[in-house]
Amino acid sequence: MKRRLVIGGGLTTALLLGPLAGIGSAQTIEEVATAANEMWLVLAAALVMLMQAGFALVEAGFTRAKNAGNIIMKNVMDFAVGGLMYWAVGFGLAYGGTSVGGFFAHGEFFFNNADRGSEWLFQVVFAATAATIISGAVAGRVKFKSYLIYTPFITGLIYPVVTHWTWGGGWLAELGYTDFAGSGIVHMLGGVAALAGVLVVGPRIGKYDENGKPKAIPGHSITLGALGVFILWFGWYGFNAGSTLASVGADIAYPAVTTTIAACAGSVGAMIAAWVVVGKPDVGFTLNGVLAGLVGITAGPDVISFSGSVLVGLIAGVIMTISVIGLERVGIDDPVGAISVHGTAGLWGVLAVAIFGGGSFIDQSVGALAIIAWTFVTSFAVFKLVDVLVGIRVSPEEEVEGLDRSEHGGEAYPEFLFQEQVAPKEALDPVGGN
């Protein structure tokens, strides 16, 4: 499936926009349709861009207070640095004028095509989403400068190549792989890259006891995490419904409905699974269940039935919960569950298109394996290279102190620093004397 801006035409366009044809002699029905489609694409892009705020809040809330500022900085740079890289080379590798063997495109580097502006805008927010998935998985122990070195690779090379294979009309698209809004292309890719990063950087200090048994390290604000999940859910309507790439002649309501149903079912599935496995309806698992359901439906929100969406979301929530627990037990420390929410649920979403949406199971499986292999090998290589060149992990002392102080020279919650440094002195000398 080529991810291109389309113009609804024919009878549908005439019926919808015919009355507007007389607005002015130069304003034809086709021009109005083009304007409506571009308006929808820009609006959808804005909704997806808002998801960056959701990711920032989820990751900050699910991790320690002493690293909240570092989380915010990484999320800002995911979009800022990632956006510049996508402008310079990423869009050209994905959607440039000439395809090189169906593997990558060539052309339109340093993007300067006003006619494709809405298309570029919609694509760059997807690239940023793929990049920001990694941030939470490696939270609390990665050097900020090392993270800045890696981020350009995800938006400038790793993600664009996969999008050319698929949405750009490359070899996977020709094979028959289908992924409407990116369960595999965006989310599974981000989850696999996160896995590579976690394997290189290792677990947080204190996560495992001397026998290798995992210990809980609670996040500092489940409230922030919940708000982030609701913002992500809201932005996902731009992600899935926006992937119609048009408003005229397109059914934008159908993917919005399947998206809603799957998110609801994902939350219920994760809550029940956590209740059974850990004995309580855990809040964190339930919130991540919403996201797992959203990730799961993203490959086929346009073709999976409403009842099928319930099953897709429900299963996504269950397998995400099992995946989080299983990965933790084998020594993979992912503070926010990003690998499971995006990687595991993303793989399920790719296969769900074949099960519930009429796609080819072989084509979907080949596509998933290709994306996993490419992403893991390239991401692992980049993380390893960064580790060799500049080091990827902060010192134990810096990790214990918190990355807000050691990496950024400040505090997300400065009253902690005040209580530590100023309040004790005032308690000893309350009137300010000697």
Image (cartoon, rainbow, N blue to C red):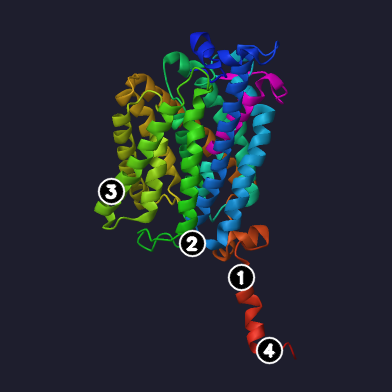
Badge count? 4
**Residue 277 is one of the magenta-drawn residues:** no
For image coordinates 48% across by 60% down, the residue present is 221
Amino acid, disc 1: Glu
What stretch of residues is rendered in magenta? 104-130
| Left or right for 225, reference 352 | right
Amino acid, disc 3: Ala
Q: CA distance from mark 3 to mark 4?
A: 55 Å
Contact between labelled residues 2 and 4, with CB atoms less than 8 Å apart: no
The answer to whether any part of residue 193 appears in the image is no
* Residue 429 disc label: 4
Circle 3 Cα neighbour tier, 10 Å, few/some/many (<14 / 14–19 / ≥20): many
Magenta stretch, overall SS: helix
For image coordinates 68% across by 30% down, the residue present is 87
Name the foreground residue: 349 vs 188: 349
Q: Residue furthest top?
A: 10
Amino acid, disc 4: Asp
Amino acid, disc 2: His
What residue does disc 1 label? 415
What residue does disc 2 label? 220
Q: Label 4: state its secondary structure.
A: loop
What residue does disc 3 label? 273
Residue 375 in percent (x, y) is at 50, 32
Badge 1 or badge 3: first in the primary sequence: 3
Badge 1 or badge 4: first in the primary sequence: 1
